[in-house]
């Protein structure tokens, strides 16, 4: 497959467009500090910029450098991340900071190849950090860039195949800037991201505004939405969870640590049961004498990338706080608000606290 070249190289046109039309105001664009760029790249994975901005500022306020993040308790890191979703990112963020301190003396590696060996940093994220911070001539292939390049090249091979994915990486590398890399690599990398976010969108791309229109094979065939091609589709599943909120007379709730793998891994959560029988067995441990009230709350659905969680919460008020089965702890509102809680659990506890249910 040949690389198109009309009206100057692809890289030159992307760089020129980014200067005048791209995003240049975001806080992580005003630095070449790899810690700040890395933090933004991890937060931006499958998350919109507008959502990330507040989290990014809070993280930097609490953890201004990689050493501060590495020394922090994981619960504090998870607590600050709560609501941002995809919580494995936060766990890997913490692990990565610790590994940078231990294995690299607190200094991020300058090459994408070594960056990609760190926890939570895949090839594309490593390329972005290396390009933005060190102007290394390496490609990226996040979702936006993959869409731009497959349309530009009319790359119709199935990206469910690792072989075809590698081929696209090679083609992406052949399009990289060749001159003035110090400024061109950050601009080009950001420009491809910006094109995918603002113009080369999944549906109804605004081809007339694209600087690559004259070279775009998909535009010539009037079928840009055909790309990228991936036959392996995500299989959605549904699960029904019974949530039990046990609250004592001081307003504290019983929170347990989730398993180290799976949904909400390692986070604090109210007890979760897969069926009513299991939940009833747990409730029976409380003893009739300690129960004050039991109320079934409004069920709701929490949508994850690959799963729909049908959540059925029950609130139980008890007059005596006893140790319950499982790895748990009683925490008051001032405590559970700063630990790592999944967003729907945090909202649920806040709602019960203000008697919204």
Image: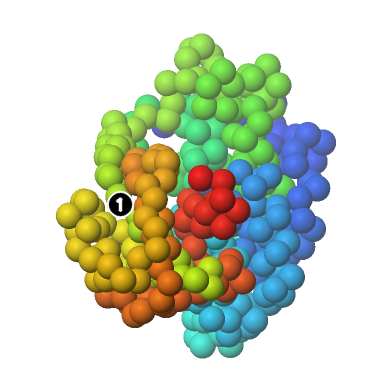
Q: Quadrant of the N terminus?
A: top left
Q: Which residue is mark 1?
A: 242
Give whichever of 293, 181 is nearer the camera.
293
| Residue closer to the observer: 82 or 71 | 82
Q: Residues within 10 Å of mark 1 (few under 14, many from 20)?
A: many
Q: Quadrant of residue 59?
A: bottom right
Residue 63 position in % (x across, y down): 67, 75
Q: Is residue 147 visible?
A: yes
Residue found 72% across the figure and 48% down from its top: 187
Single out the residue that lies furthest toward the front: 289
Is 203 or 16 nearer to us in this picture? Answer: 203
Number of marks in picture: 1
Image vertical order of residue 235 relative to residue 88, above or below: above
Residue 304: image quadrant is top left
Residue under the point 58% across and 68% down: 333
What residue lies at 37% left-to-right and 76% top-to-bottom?
328
């Amino acid at each position: 497959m040949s690389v198109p070249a009309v009206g100057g190289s692809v890289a030159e046109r992307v760089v020129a467009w980014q200067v005048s039309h791209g995003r240049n105001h975001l806080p992580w664009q005003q630095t070449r500090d790899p810690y700040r760029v890395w933090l933004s790249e991890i937060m931006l994975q499958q998350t919109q910029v507008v959502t990330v901005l507040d989290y990014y500022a809070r993280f930097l306020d609490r953890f201004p450098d990689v050493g501060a993040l590495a020394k922090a308790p994981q619960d504090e890191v998870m607590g600050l991340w709560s609501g941002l979703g995809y919580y494995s990112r936060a766990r890997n963020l913490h692990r990565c900071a610790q590994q940078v301190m231990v294995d690299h003396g607190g200094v991020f590696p300058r090459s994408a190849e070594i960056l990609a060996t760190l926890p939570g940093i895949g090839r594309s994220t490593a390329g972005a950090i290396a390009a933005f911070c060190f102007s290394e001539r390496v490609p990226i292939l996040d979702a936006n860039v993959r869409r731009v390049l497959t349309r530009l090249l009319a790359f119709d091979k199935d990206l469910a195949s690792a072989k075809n994915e590698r081929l696209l990486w090679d083609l992406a590398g052949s399009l990289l800037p060749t001159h003035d890399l110090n400024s061109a690599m950050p601009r080009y990398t950001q420009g491809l991201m910006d094109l995918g976010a603002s113009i080369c969108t999944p549906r109804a791309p605004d081809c007339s505004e694209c600087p690559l229109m004259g070279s775009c094979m998909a535009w010539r065939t009037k079928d840009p939405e055909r790309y990228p091609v991936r036959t392996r589709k995500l299989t959605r599943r549904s699960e029904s969870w019974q949530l039990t909120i046990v609250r004592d007379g001081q307003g504290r709730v019983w929170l347990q640590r989730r398993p180290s793998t799976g949904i909400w891994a390692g986070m604090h959560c109210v007890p979760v049961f897969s069926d009513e029988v299991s939940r009833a067995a747990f409730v029976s441990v409380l003893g009739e004498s300690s129960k004050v009230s039991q109320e079934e709350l409004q069920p709701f659905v929490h949508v994850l990338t690959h799963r729909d969680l049908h959540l059925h919460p029950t609130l139980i008020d008890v007059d005596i706080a006893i140790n319950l089965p499982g790895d748990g702890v009683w925490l008051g509102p001032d405590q559970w608000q700063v630990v790592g809680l999944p967003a729907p659990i945090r909202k649920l506890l806040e709602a019960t606290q203000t008697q919204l249910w």
